[in-house]
Image (cartoon, rainbow, N blue to C red):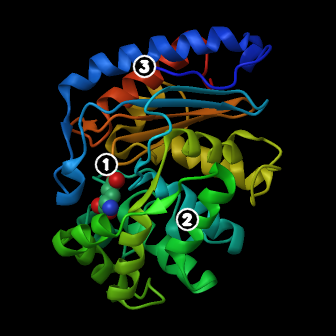
Amino acid sequence: MSTCGVAEGRSAVGRPADVLVEYAHAAAEHGRAAAATGEVSAQIPELSRVDPDRFGLAVALLDGTEIQVGDAARPFSLQSVTKLFALCALLRDEPTAWEHVGWDSSGAGYGSVSELETHAGRPRNPFVNAGALVVTDRLLHHTGDAAGAVTDLLRDLGGEHVQRDRQVALSEAAHDHRNRAIAHVLAEHGRLLHGVDTVLAQYFEQCSITASALAVARAALLLADRTGARGPLDAGVVRRVNAVLLTAGMYGAAGDIAYRVGLPAKSGIGGGVVAVLPGVGSICVWSPRLDRTGNSTGAVAAIEEFARLAGWSVF
Ligand code: GLU
């Protein structure tokens, strides 16, 4: 079942909004077909209970146009998509936080312990788990509740239906050895302000945030607005976040996605991917089956197709 939201007048890159609605439906069909090949993440047991055939696509434009297809209004587990909003919340409170989390691309997996060791415990960027744990730790320092700060930011920007899923947080806490190992290496190198257990509990809570593709697309407009007027970050910070998203937002496939899609994007193992076209808008797609790099097969295929049809690219 597909539904369309608001679509009035002319829109992004000079195209009438009804043409973008057509592109969104075509992209969703493309994505649904590609989704047949992936596997739902088994990393967090509670996440594997999701219906693998769910598919939602939402486009939000700076001019107010919103397009929804399929399950665009149904909340899903954001997981690493929250890393993007946690970074934005931290940069609002601590604009110099880059020096603690880094901004380089990573040559290893997002959960690499060895890469962290190679660099004296300094994370490569805020989207590998080491960097995300440092972001959560520092955000906790500034706000007293990092997961709450990310939830609030998403609610402010994305609207209704932003929640936290306690069962997912507990399920991750009970099975996660890797993030615990990373947190201990960070602590050993003096990179954390709080204890390992405190940081991990906040991080798992943050990752368990649920929101719809529409809410995430709306929230990501803060990165689409080149003036910085949509959110708490100024224009220069928005540019930097987009640059690091392009080089590090899609796990080990960031280069491949930059080549194929050409948009800054962030994915999560819940099957969500959000991508931004600065000056125009954003698109978020949720499709739970993942490819070997941990990115949603259906979401990447749908975003690639939408970008191709609509001419969305930063290049
Ligand atoms: N909570 C998961 C972890 O930290 C998120 C993974 C992901 O979405 O990339 O391992």
Query: Residue 225 location, x and y as percent?
Result: 76, 41
Q: Which amino acid type corresponds to the residue marked 1 in the rendered image?
A: Ile
Query: Residue 259 location, x and y as percent?
Result: 45, 25
Query: How dense is the environment of label 3, judged by Cα within 10 Å: few (below 14), some, or many (20 and up)?
Result: many
> Which residue shows up at 26% across the image and 73% down it?
170
Give the residue pinned by disc 1.
269
| Nearest-to-viewer mark from 2 and 1 | 2
Query: How dense is the environment of label 1, judged by Cα within 10 Å: few (below 14), some, or many (20 and up)?
Result: many
Question: Do the numbered discs 3 and 1 sit on residues whose CB atoms are within 8 Å?
Answer: no
Dot placed on the residue nearer the N-terminal end, 2 or 3: 3
Q: Image quadrant of ligand 1?
A: bottom left
Q: Is mark 1 within 8 Å of ligand 1?
A: yes
Q: Which quadrant would residue 282 be assigned to in this image?
A: top right
Say what secondary structure mark 1 lies in: loop
Query: Residue 52 location, x and y as percent?
Result: 23, 36
Specify the label residue 95 is tagged with: none
Specify the label residue 28 is tagged with: 3
Query: Residue 166 location, x and y as percent?
Result: 34, 70
Give the residue pinned by disc 2.
151
Q: Which amino acid type corresponds to the residue marked 2 in the rendered image?
A: Thr
Dot placed on the residue nearer the N-terminal end, 3 or 1: 3
